[in-house]
Image (cartoon, grey):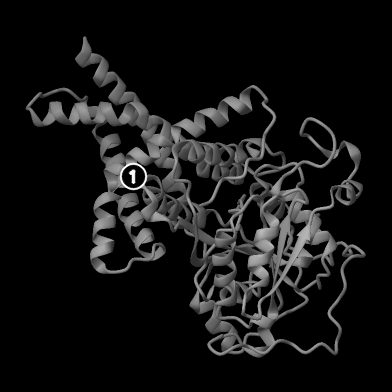
Amino acid sequence: MLLEAVVAVFVLTQLAYCVGNGALVSLLVRRPDALVDDGTLERIVAGADLDRTRVPARSDGGVSGGADPPSTDVSRPASEPRPTARSGCRLPQSAVRRVRVLVPIYRETPAVLAETLDNIAAQRYPTAAVSVSVIHEPDDPTVSAVRESAAAREDDLDVEFVAVDRAALAADRSPGDWTFSGTGVPRTKAAALTYAFTTLSLAPDDVVTVFDSDTQVPLDTFELAVAGLTEYDIVQAKQTARNVDDGLLPLLESMGIAAWSDLIYANSADGPYQLLGKAYFTSATVLYELDRWQLDAVTEDMALGVAAHERGCTLGIIDRYVQDLCPAGLEAWVRQKRRWVRGPYRHLLTPGWSGRERGRFWAGTVLTQLLSVTNVLGLPAGLAVLWLTVTDSTGVVPASLTPVIAFNGIVWWYYSWRSYRAAWEAVTFDSRWDRFRYSLVSNPLTQALYATLWTVPICLALADAIRGATPTFDVTPKN
């Protein structure tokens, strides 16, 4: 009886894997030609004209001048000189644009933000063309220490602190716009970003990017992003975790997130797409047309990406990896992923999408989550059947299931191979021996266990969505 039950579970989970792997294959068979890399820069250097008045493409093939910017916007005076490209910047002088980095913080340590500011200042891009706006809540008790640390910097990076004025932000939107319970403006990242964007003096062609306090990017990311914006309305870097020495969770996530963003996310650039919350770049004009961020969105990156796709904005994928901090503790990790996972659920039935668009969106979200949930029973059932097979227990698995098992095995092998490739590109290693040890720990089996762990936040997020629980915005602690 036990044998029959194990075989039944194995058959059912293999069929579930087949559905999830089929969704993966549907994303992998046609990789969009939307990569922003060194070739993009070469086209700029070779003399491609930089259209500084470019407006977002429209899904109907037309163009629009877009909405007039709010009165808070001021254009750069014609007499203001364009910043000189610093040594090592590969962009021609005519292609250099001002980059405005928005960094919302809450209860952050000075050391974490200092590393991010160091990374921004070290970019192979003219520092005079970069300004950083650190956005904070007026009652944040850690701001004074963070401000003192930033003031003590010896480089010439322009850093300003912006305190969110909730009364001013509330006046910007109708009183009935909030879906959170209670009154007033919700304390979300989206609200902080919207306030800063609305009150800062931005020229229409300024490049706007969002960083978290712990964001690190390769030193040529800014120049690649600016080059990519000559071909796309929005560009987004891929993602990994950098604190691989802090524990098993960050180490496994560094490979898991790198593989996901390189294989699944990059293949979803045709849309409907999401943004990844950090290191996405676009022009102020595009953000004006999208009416900035959705204030009550806990996953503001998802909402902005879907809105951009619906307006016909094109997405390019920067062939570089953002490195941020992954929670090392299980509780904080689950809390963060629970919020991330729930983001797509409110868009699953978005009206107006074609069947192909809806299928791609479901394939990249719900159906790939199915793989993690299936692992809960699929892994033990698979190991049990493998043991029975190698111990000469013939006839355990129905012969008709062989093609399904073979298909699942091929997809699993291919994804594992691509995961290693992505991790080796994304994670910084001190030596080949360091990379070898990393690869021994983060292997296909431990990655399967890591994927299974996602079942916890997936089930919690699904339960929240079913019972209509009010979403909450929690700041993930960073050490």
Residue ID for mark 1: 447
Q: Splitting the image into 4 quarters, where does residue 390 fall?
A: top left
Q: Is residue 384 above or below residue 210?
A: above
Between 380 and 154, the one lying in front of the other is: 154
- Percent across and percent down for residue 229 are 65, 72
State whether residue 293 appears in this view. Answer: no
- Percent across and percent down for residue 470 are 70, 29
Spot the residue most to the left: 392
| Disc 1 element | helix
Q: Is residue 279 above or below residue 85?
A: above
Between 356 and 431, the one lying in front of the other is: 431
* Amino acid type at mark 1: Gln
Q: Is residue 121 above or below residue 308?
A: below
Q: Splitting the image into 4 quarters, where does residue 86 fall?
A: bottom right
- Percent across and percent down for residue 445 are 27, 42
Q: Is residue 461 above or below residue 160?
A: above
**How many numbered discs, if any?**
1
State whether residue 471 appears in this view. Answer: yes
Spot the residue most to the top: 1
Residue located at (53% from left, 84% from top): 42
